[in-house]
Image (cartoon, rainbow, N blue to C red):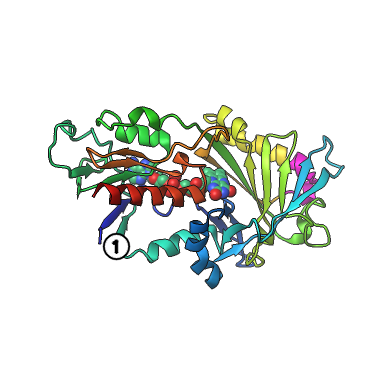
Amino acid sequence: MPQITIFEKSRSVGRLATRYRTDSGTGKNWQWAFGAQFFTAKTTSFKQFITPWLDTGLLQPWCAQVIDLTPVNNDTQTPDIHIKEQWNTVQARYISTPKMTSWGRTLTDELQYSTITFKTRVAPLAQYDNNLVEKGDKKTELFDDTGASLGHFDWVICTAPNAQATEIMAESGFAEQAKISEPKMLACYTLMLGWNSVEQLPRSLNNDRKSVWDVAYLNNSVLDRIFIEHQKPAHEDLLPSLTIHARNDWSEQHVDDDMEMIKAQLLQAARQALSWSDDHAPSQIDCHRWRYAATVTDSDKEALGILIDESHQWIVSGDWCGQGNIESCYQMAQQTVEAINKAK
Ligand SMILES: Cc1cc2nc3c(=O)[nH]c(=O)nc-3n(C[C@H](O)[C@H](O)[C@H](O)COP(=O)(O)OP(=O)(O)OC[C@H]3O[C@@H](n4cnc5c(N)ncnc54)[C@H](O)[C@@H]3O)c2cc1C
């Protein structure tokens, strides 16, 4: 069996991220899935892969009621809303419960032949070893960013977003270097809002205590989508929490702007979309910048697929080699396993 070592620079698993805050009075949480909100399982093999966690209830289909929402320019008017669709169990969108991070954590706990080392940044391959290309020995020595050796490996698989992969593989002699930067990844700003009680929610959200909608696609706004967290399956105990993603093109244009300014702009746009008065304003406001959030996909072009350098035994992979979503991570991992098996 292969022994796999995963190096991850952050403290925990990646963009299946959850942020939460506890109210000191009630002990209850506001909670925001501020990265991926849900994922699809369109292919048979990914459907099979997720079945055990669907059986335990860790993963659940989210049959959200989706609307189109057009903001109005006046706080006193409710926005223009049209029912768009209801996500169903046939073309399901799945979430992880009780948090989006739960699935990533469970996957990590169940790893049998892999160890995962957090808070370790792998240095660019060429940084500490200029003779990589000439080496007859196929093992690659990796280093962390302090120059400490992380060990020797038969295969190196890089799954960082492509801008970071470009840096990690730069000047290493990686055969497919030029292709890494082909897919374009755009940024995303995420606004997280919380209210102290359902009664305090704006009228556009508190329709008979439960909103008639769960997800809103926005028109004429810098915002792209609004997700109602406390209406997701197995999320009923949360304090009212909303996650709002800004449009990717707008986020990319403003990617280096001051965060406080961005937060104020997004809050203003959210207020316009949900039209709240001062006494229905959120009590929790937070904002996050994702530099590499969305891969631009072209329906006319085939996805890039993983990039293989057989002579070095290096692979560059990641969701951006496919459609840029969770299902693509699985598909690219499958391609990676197949490539390594074939090269044996
Ligand atoms: C705002 C947002 C919304 C999204 N919405 C959806 C959605 O609705 N549905 C969906 O399916 N997908 C969605 N996605 C995409 C989904 O989150 C990604 O497809 C998925 O998380 C990618 O996983 P990954 O492991 O390939 O990459 P990542 O999660 O990016 O993991 C790569 C990891 O590499 C680490 N790393 C980078 N450089 C180094 C280094 N030098 N050393 C060590 N570690 C390093 C990073 O810290 C990172 O954790 C969304 C993403 C964002 C940001």
Q: Is residue 172 left or right of residue 279?
A: left
Q: Is residue 37 left or right of residue 64?
A: left
Reply yes or no: does residue 341 show up in magenta.
no
Tell me which residue sits at (77%, 61%) in the image. Answer: 210
- Rendered view: 213 above or below 303: below
Tell me which residue sits at (50%, 63%) in the image. Answer: 48
Give the percent coordinates (x, y) of residue 132. Answer: 18, 34
- Which residue is denoted by mark 1 in the rendering? 113
Tell me which residue sits at (21%, 48%) in the image. Answer: 154
Check disc 1 and give the amino acid type.
Tyr
Can residue 8 be seen in the rendering of this structure? no
Give the percent coordinates (x, y) of residue 111. Answer: 35, 63
Residue found at the very far left of the displayed protein:
136
Q: Which residues are magenta?
A: 271-281
Q: Chief secondary structure of the magenta span?
A: helix
Q: Is residue 171 left or right of residue 333?
A: left
Q: Which quarter shows the N terminus?
A: bottom left
| Count of numbered marks | 1
In this orientation, which residue lies closer to the viewer: 10 or 317?
317
In this orientation, which residue lies closer to the viewer: 193 or 46?
46
